[in-house]
């Protein structure tokens, strides 16, 4: 057999969707040769298989509409191990076939197989027991049942014949349409489908279909014609209403017999430190004394808290939330000093910023927290082979109180009955306040490093033998491409620490570790007795130094820190370089080193060029310190507005303007900001450039030209209301009319932006009347019609307002006339009103009438 690619892909998808269990069983069956035969009835469409199970089952495999459908004669019917075995056999036969020759199909054999198949299907359909459901389905279809239809009815009949019983989710799912999504759990949950078990299988099906509709599940299409919900709708709605009433009765009945909950008060806690253990104490009334927790009380309060039935005092909540363990078998309210798990919780509690009265001594007074830390008092031995005596003492030199426990961290805490002390690293003392250490052990690099870390002053005979060497840390950064070209680049960082007498170390995702083993001598040299101590202060900056590079990631192979280069990387990397502590050396490759260079310094001057009447294009002219930059590179730097730009082999550069605060203020008065400069010209009006602040940045000839034009401008235009306007304007309307006249007198553009209903139409009509009486350019041809473009809904309003306020104005509303009417309208009307849609259609003709440019009348449009 030779299958098409789509058929094979669909077969594989079907097998993948079947899950593990059917495929596993099928593979076992297939190994035992349980698939007797696979016959192809129609290539790439229909196949029959015979599979041996408890008996020989027939499997039909059909490929249609891009997916496979399968049906088996076993009780499971679909997606069973027999279907999986047949599919696997079909796939195996395809893989073993000779694809070099086309298949030859025996028409007689195919016809015989199909005839045998349909005959068996017909016999199977006939074998269905007679029932009301079967009769209605056959009558509706008007034909015998097909195999799949008969199989579905057999499942429904089988479920009905089991009689009244607890109907489960599994029973319901067996009748659902193939492909319905089910919850993986709850298959044995009982489903309530009917008020009483149905009398026949037809009504049984109606109740099942009602539930399918409620859940949004599907069922076979051929059943839709006999599924008449109106037969049970009244019964079901009445029954569902009764169930709803009963549910609410049961829910509300609890309130009838509900006993009042006892008042629990507000739970207050404190931590008491005793000689044997620290323990939580509680009270629920402010005036009551604190009491130790007992197991029943602890469980009660934990249960109430879990149910949300208790209020914990805000000052006590940190203690409660950290200590309470409702699931723990331990006495979570006790912290024995010998219990390592309890000490971890106690360590966190003692470091919390709690109120002083939340942590108390055994007598109930707040636990003291001396400001001065404990220190180590060192007594040298009497001879070279003796012992050093180390004692833990207070700041005044008095012996330390008895240590109850030592809590590691930063700083190390020493808990005593008298108070909580800060002290040296706890590895040297634990619970003892005195130690004796042999001199040969302490007088080593390790011993002296421990004393150095604890800030213990060394005796004179030791201080002269110690030489402290700082450990140098170097961050090496290299730019690499991980694909062709520069499309994908990354910065490789390595952090190394080294010093004479130590193995080199590197910083990884798991911290500092040695790079390689060497024969470095870590013990004092026998010749001169000098002990070298390594000062690792620079190493303490990690990983904090790297954390500001948010996208930095560690890679195990090849090992190293990697930072992908994006548009934002230069700014972020340059900022990071400035934040690295000075004692850490940063080594950059040639291109990355440009991110650390000083920016290109540029002096600012302005060059203007007249663009239109009263408008000038202003360009920024730079005088930069770097003479190697080309004009194109300067343009790129200028357009970057102070950001980094990559300039080929010159690396990353950025531009910084040499502008004093005074010059910055002068530019701001003109409307310029150095941070917004670009290579593109900016357009300014002559009045903006006439400000005295612009003189310093403009050439003298440009300043003279600008001031000459400013002198020609009319800064105040206040004409009287034209006599042809029949209205008395309000003050703000008069101001708007003067504003329009001012714009026209100085050949400015502008917008009259009053709110709706404030009389913009009247102001515009007054302006048009003034224009007709005072044309911008004297002559008979300058006073032409004006064009108003407005929404279609207000076109009539323009006509009404013009007749009311400007009766002598000839107004023409453009209806559906063609563009050929425009010349006549220009001669017979003073104002032509069109809408936006008409403008799109008439714009070529309007432009033609005005000689390719908008006429004066168009510019006068309101």
Image (cartoon, grey):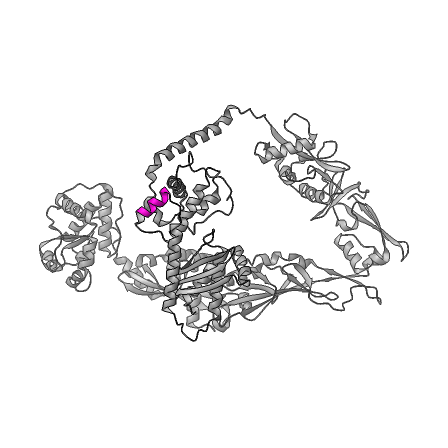
Find residue 597 and report its horizontal and vertical position in percent: 54, 66
The image quadrant that residue 200 belongs to is top left
Q: Let me know if residue 619 appears in the view.
A: no
The magenta segment is: 129-139
Q: Position of residue 667 (x, y in %)?
A: 40, 58
100 versus 683 height, above or below: below
Residue 412: % across, % down: 72, 47
Residue at the (42%, 44%) spot, across then down: 157
Left or right placement of residue 208 versus residue 561 in this view? left
Q: Residue at x 65, y 33 (%)?
A: 299
Q: Residue at x 23, y 48 (%)?
A: 738
Chief secondary structure of the magenta portion = helix
Residue, far right: 383
Q: Is residue 447 left or right of residue 97?
A: right
Q: Answer yes or no: is residue 78 visible.
A: yes
Residue displayed at 41% across by 71% down: 632
Depicted 737 relative to depicted 250: above or below = below
The answer to whether residue 713 is above or below residue 475 is: above
In the rendered view of the protein, which quadrant contains the N terminus? bottom left
Pick whichever, 288 or 780, lies toward us.
288
**Magenta highlight on residue 135:** yes
């Amino acid at each position: 057999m030779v299958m098409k690619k789509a058929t094979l892909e669909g077969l594989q998808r079907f097998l993948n969707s079947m899950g593990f269990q059917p495929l596993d069983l099928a593979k076992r069956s297939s190994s035992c040769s349980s698939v007797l035969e696979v016959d192809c009835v129609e290539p790439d469409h229909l196949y029959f298989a015979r599979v041996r199970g408890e008996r020989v089952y027939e499997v039909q495999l059909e490929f249609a509409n891009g997916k496979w459908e399968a049906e088996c004669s076993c009780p499971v019917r679909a997606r069973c191990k027999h279907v999986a075995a047949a599919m696997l056999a079909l796939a195996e036969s395809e893989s073993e076939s000779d694809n070099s020759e086309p298949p030859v199909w025996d028409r007689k054999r195919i016809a015989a197989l199909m005839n045998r198949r349909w005959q068996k299907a017909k016999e199977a359909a006939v074998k269905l027991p007679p029932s009301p459901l079967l009769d209605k389905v056959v009558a509706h279809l008007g034909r015998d049942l097909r195999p799949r239809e008969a199989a579905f009815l057999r499942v429904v009949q089988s479920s009905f014949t089991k009689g009244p019983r607890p109907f489960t989710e599994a029973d319901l799912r067996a009748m659902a349409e193939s492909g319905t999504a089910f919850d993986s759990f709850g298959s044995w949950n009982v489903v309530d489908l009917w008020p009483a078990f149905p009398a026949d299988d037809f009504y049984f099906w109606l109740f099942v279909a009602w539930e399918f509709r409620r859940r949004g599940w599907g069922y076979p299409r051929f059943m839709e014609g006999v599924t008449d919900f109106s037969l049970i709708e009244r019964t079901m709605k009445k029954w569902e209403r009764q169930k709803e009433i009963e549910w609410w009765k049961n829910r509300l009945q609890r309130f009838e017999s509900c006993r009042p909950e006892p008042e629990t008060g507000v739970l207050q806690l404190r931590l008491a430190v005793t000689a044997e253990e620290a323990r939580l104490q509680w009270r629920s009334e402010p005036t009551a004394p604190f009491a130790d927790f007992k197991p029943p009380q602890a469980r009660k309060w934990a249960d109430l808290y879990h149910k949300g039935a208790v209020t914990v005092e805000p000052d006590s909540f940190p203690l409660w939330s950290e200590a309470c363990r409702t699931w723990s078998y331990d006495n979570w309210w006790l912290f024995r000093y010998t219990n390592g798990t309890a000490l971890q919780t106690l360590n966190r509690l003692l470091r919390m910023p709690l109120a002083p009265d939340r942590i108390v001594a055994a007598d109930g007074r707040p636990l003291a927290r001396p400001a001065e830390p404990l220190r180590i008092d060192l007594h040298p031995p009497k001879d070279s082979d003796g012992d050093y005596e180390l004692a833990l003492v207070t700041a005044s030199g008095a012996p330390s109180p008895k240590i109850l426990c030592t809590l590691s961290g930063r700083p190390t805490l020493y808990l005593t009955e008298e108070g909580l002390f800060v002290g040296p690293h706890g590895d040297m003392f634990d619970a003892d306040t005195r130690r004796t250490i042999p001199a040969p052990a302490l007088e080593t690099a390790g011993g002296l490093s421990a004393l150095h870390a604890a800030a213990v002053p060394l005796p004179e005979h030791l201080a002269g033998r110690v030489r402290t060497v700082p450990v140098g840390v170097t961050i090496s950064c290299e730019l690499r491409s991980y694909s062709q070209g520069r499309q994908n680049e990354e910065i490789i960082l390595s952090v190394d620490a080294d010093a004479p007498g130590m193995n080199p170390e590197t910083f990884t995702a798991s911290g500092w570790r040695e790079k390689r083993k060497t024969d470095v001598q870590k013990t004092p040299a026998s010749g001169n007795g000098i002990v070298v101590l390594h000062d690792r202060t620079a190493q303490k900056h990690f990983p904090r130094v790297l954390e500001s590079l948010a996208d930095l990631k560690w890679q195990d192979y090849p090992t190293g820190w990697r930072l992908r280069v994006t548009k934002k990387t230069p700014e972020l990397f340059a900022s990071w370089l400035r934040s690295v502590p000075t004692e850490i050396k940063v080594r950059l490759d040639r291109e990355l080193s440009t991110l650390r260079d000083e920016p290109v310094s540029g002096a600012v001057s302005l060059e203007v060029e007249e663009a239109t009447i009263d408008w000038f294009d202003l360009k920024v002219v730079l005088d930069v310190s770097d003479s190697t930059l080309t004009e194109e590179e300067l343009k790129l730097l200028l357009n970057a507005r102070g950001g980094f730009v990559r300039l080929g082999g010159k690396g990353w550069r950025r531009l910084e303007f040499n502008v004093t605060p005074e010059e910055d203020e002068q530019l701001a008065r003109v409307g310029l900001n150095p941070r917004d400069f670009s290579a593109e010209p900016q357009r300014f009006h002559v009045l903006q450039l006439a400000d005295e602040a612009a003189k310093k940045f403009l050439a003298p000839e440009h300043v003279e030209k600008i001031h000459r034009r400013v002198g020609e401008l009319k800064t105040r235009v206040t004409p009287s209301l034209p006599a042809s306007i029949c209205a008395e304007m309000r003050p703000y309307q008069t101001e708007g009319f003067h504003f329009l006249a001012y714009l026209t007198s100085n050949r400015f553009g502008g917008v009259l932006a009053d709110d709706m209903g404030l009389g913009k139409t009247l102001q515009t009509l007054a302006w048009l009347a003034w224009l007709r009486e005072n044309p911008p350019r004297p002559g008979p041809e300058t006073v032409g019609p004006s064009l108003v473009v407005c929404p279609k809904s207000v076109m009539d309003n323009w006509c009404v307002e013009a007749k009311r306020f400007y009766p002598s104005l000839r107004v023409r509303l453009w209806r559906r006339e063609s563009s050929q009417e425009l010349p006549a309208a220009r001669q017979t009307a003073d104002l032509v009103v069109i809408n936006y849609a008409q403008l799109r259609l008439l714009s070529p003709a309007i432009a033609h009438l005005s000689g390719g440019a908008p006429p004066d009348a168009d510019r006068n449009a309101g």
